[in-house]
Amino acid sequence: MDLGLTVGDSLERLEATAEGFDFVELSIGESSLRPAEADDERLREVLDGLGADLCVHLPFDQVVSTPVSQLNDAIVDYQSELLEWASGVGARKAVLHGTMRNPHDTDQRPVFASQLSAIAAAGDDVGVEVVVENVGHQARGLPLSVLGDIARDTGTAVCFDVGHAYMEDGDDGIERFLDDYRDLVSHLHVHDARGRGDTHLPLGAGEIDFGLVSDALAGFDGTVAVEVFTDDVPLLRDSARRAAEGFDGTQ
């Protein structure tokens, strides 16, 4: 298991907070770091200095599919360009939000599956593993079980966001998803949450039973990204310690 840190779109934040982590997850594209404006050499220097690998998060604002075929083609083209750039700077994985224009339109779900397959194939072509993330608590996010079924049908790996799953369906949702789809999980986002709406909290500050995750994913050999929204390094390291101890069975 490799333990990493999400750093948003800031190279400064990456350099200031990511020491001691195996990898960083950098947000790219729309509303984030735009590769055309990025100093690739600077990014490589910072990663080399930290001894960290790179993962990326594809655009948050961009849905995977719409009812308009021309827009869908453009989405695949745009994501493919980002994946090619990510490959060029050494990224291992790319996180993609599982979103569509209307996630409750069951007739459009095959379109989402086709789009997901095309984006994942573009990643395969350049050596970057695309992992689709559950965001069912958001307006455009596919529900947990629907996302799991589509990921299985398309052979796409999953980024399981523990806090998002809790916000969608509590500890029961976490447990059910991992019971049914644990074999698809290649990447994890870990942060704590509270049912009142607080999320991306340090581990231990919320209500999630993380034992459900460590028990279901015993022996997990993928990547785990701490996604806590703070630049407080001691808090980040404490969350990383708690995550590591949970998977080691010592917590």
Image (tube, rainbow, N blue to C red):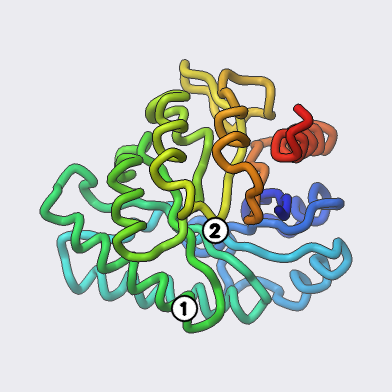
**Residue closer to the observer: 171 or 168:** 171
Farthest-out residue, left: 107
Circle 2 is placed at which residue position? 57
Farthest-out residue, right: 49
Q: Position of residue 220 (x, y in %)?
A: 63, 49
Residue neighbourhood size for the residue with mark 1, other residues' Cα within 10 Å, grouped as few (<14), some (14–19), many (≥20):
some
Residue type indicated by callout 2: His
**Secondary element at tag 1:** helix
Relative to 57, 145 lies left or right: left
**Secondary element at tag 2:** strand
Q: Is residue 165 above or below residue 180?
A: above
Circle 1 is placed at which residue position? 81
Residue neighbourhood size for the residue with mark 2, other residues' Cα within 10 Å, grouped as few (<14), some (14–19), many (≥20):
many
Residue type indicated by callout 1: Glu
Q: Is residue 250 above or below residue 106?
A: above
User: First in sequence: mark 2 or mark 1?
Assistant: 2
Relative to 93, 181 lies left or right: left
**Residue closer to the observer: 97 or 246:** 246
Q: Position of residue 172 (x, y in %)?
A: 42, 25
Q: Residue at x 82, y 38 (%)?
A: 233
Q: Is residue 83 above or below residue 20?
A: below
Q: Which mark is residue 116?
A: none
* Mark 2 to mark 1 CA distance (whole Å): 14 Å
Q: Is residue 219 visible?
A: yes
Q: Residue at x 75, y 51 (%)?
A: 13
Q: Residue at x 51, y 42 (%)?
A: 161
Q: Is residue 231 visible?
A: no
Relative to 17, 32 lies left or right: left
Q: Position of residue 52 (x, y in %)?
A: 79, 63
Query: In the picture, which quadrant includes the C terminus?
Result: top right
